[in-house]
Amino acid sequence: MAEPLLEFRDVRAGYGDSVVLDGVSFSVAEGAGMALLGRNGVGKSTLIQTIMGFTQFLSGTIVWRGREIQTVKPHLRARLGIGWVPQERDIFRSLTVEENLVVVARSGAWDVARVYDLFPRLKERRENKGNQLSGGEQQMLAIGRTLMTNPTMLLLDEPLEGLAPIIVEELGESIRKMVREAGMTLMLVEQHAEVALEMTDSAIILERGRIVHEAPSQELVNDQATLDRYIGLNISA
Amino acid sequence: MEPKSWIRARARISPYEIVFWIAAAVIPFVFFEHYLSLAASVAVAALFCISLDLILGYAGIISLGHAAFFGIGAYTAGILSARGWGEPISGLALAAAVSALAGYIVSFMIVRVQHLALLMITLGLSFLMTELAITFDQFTGGSDGLQGIDTWKLLGIWKFSLWGHTAYAYAISVLFILFLLARRIVHSPFGLTLEAIRENPVRTTALGAPNRGHLQKIFVISAAFAGVAGALLAQVSETVSPEALGFQRSAEIAVMLILGGTGRLYGAILGAIIFMVARDQISGFYLQYWYFWIGLILIFVVLFMPRGILGGLERLARIGRRS
């Protein structure tokens, strides 16, 4: 088997004195998509932030392309090719849409034109300031801004949360297109399990800081019992 | 388009700017010949104000001790001149270098703290420098100020006279050149990143920007700008006293910037013009009431024009265009 792109080995991490991730191990192959599922508060966002280096790292190993990175500073991890799109979106409000895109851009396959091609709405809003955007547009901009850094792996934290159904559809289509065409490695946190499973190859389910289930997405989408047990509602089979 | 060329294309010079600079170069000579010395000190204040705008307006680093770098520049140029080398332009260059070095040393502390701690560190720095200037009186002349500064002819041609023709031409030229440099910096990808860091440092880190490196860099640049402003004042007034480093000067420059409007460079210039001219005019009649008026104006501007006078004018212009 080829060397995984990202691997967690028995990682424990949290904030201050509290341990949120309690011995997490998994690996993602380059070009693959992994869904990260679980109820609210089980540590999904903490896991994402631990990949970036924003949590208190306690023990274990994080390996990126065969190299241990748990002591590497967050901005250098980003430069290794990890692109995080946060749940809060965190658009730079006083910058225009286009400025948000170019401000941290690094050269590569993704440029402004390609991001506009993926999200035509952003092109219409290119002169608008970050604080004049709807929730869906902010999410598109947050994804586009991260793509502009030309990451190898994209961490998408609940991209569809709080959006109107019609926007969910539009954005979901764009994300699918992006994954299909760019062959990007993806880690997708999502409350809507059926959406996440459809877009990914494999899935892990987190509960109280541990991985309690790991399966191919195709298999899990039909495993109603497991989904009910760990995620509860939110699944329309 | 490549991101960098795209950012460059955004920084075009507007016709208003050209008109402004021509007016700034000509009007004082033609209409206010008796006020050329004042005009020179306005230009010095504007340059100092721009240096504060670079860190406060663009990078969000608030400072109550920026006069420390102004004073270091002033003393560097002053001492150099008093010890026998009065050539002004090399004096400015040395002042810039020494202030930048001081800024570099201080920057390691600055980028590690925020908010109140930042205010206290910069304030402490200002106190410290003032005391040092008073204590080392064999170099600085102590609290009486530095004596014996003699500024040579500008470019070996123009003498600095009492009337201030050379002083103003010199000050406005330096201001203009450094303004262009500042403008270039804030419109560069680096400048845009500073704005993003000011807004959300965690996000810029997550996207791969080295925040501390960027903040240190702009702090050093700002310190050099402040040092040049201080050196200009020392050269045209041929005197430096410890108040050049003091809290009052730091506070005044912050007031000018807040009045004019932060994060737009021209706000710094406008603030300096309003503050310096108003002080000159008001204190001519009622010296003791000067702080009363400036206090009143400051409260009014902060309450009703949170983006400063220039920001307020821009807003009015936008409303005017819409209706």
Image (spheres, helix red, strand yellow):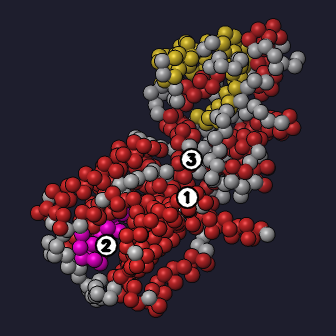
Is residue B225 placed above or below B24 in the rendered structure?
Answer: above
Pointer 3: what residue?
Answer: B199
Residue drawn at point x = 71 percent, y = 17 percent: A39
SS for callout 1: helix
Residue drawn at point x = 65 percent, y = 44 percent: A91
Figure quadrant of the N terminus of chain B = bottom right
* Residue B233 drawn in magenta: yes
- Mark 1–mark 3 Cα distance, whole angstroms, equals 20 Å
| Stretch in magenta | B223-240
SS for callout 3: helix
The answer to whether B106 appears left or right of B213 in the picture is: left
The answer to the question of whether label 1 and label 3 lie on touching residues, with beta carbons closer than 8 A, is no
**Chain letter of disc 3 in the image:** B
Do marks 1 and 3 both belong to one polypeptide chain? yes
Tell which tag, 1 or 2, sits nearer the viewer: 1
Q: Which numbered disc flags the more N-terminal residue, 1 or 2?
A: 2
Pointer 2: what residue?
Answer: B233
Q: Which mark is residue A58?
A: none
The answer to whether A229 appears left or right of B87 in the picture is: right
Where is residue A138 drawn, in percent x and y? 72, 43
Residue drawn at point x = 41 percent, y = 69 percent: B289
The residue positioned farthest toward the left in the image shown: B138
Q: Which mark is residue B302?
A: 1
Quarter residue B114 falls in: top left
* Residue A110 drawn in magenta: no
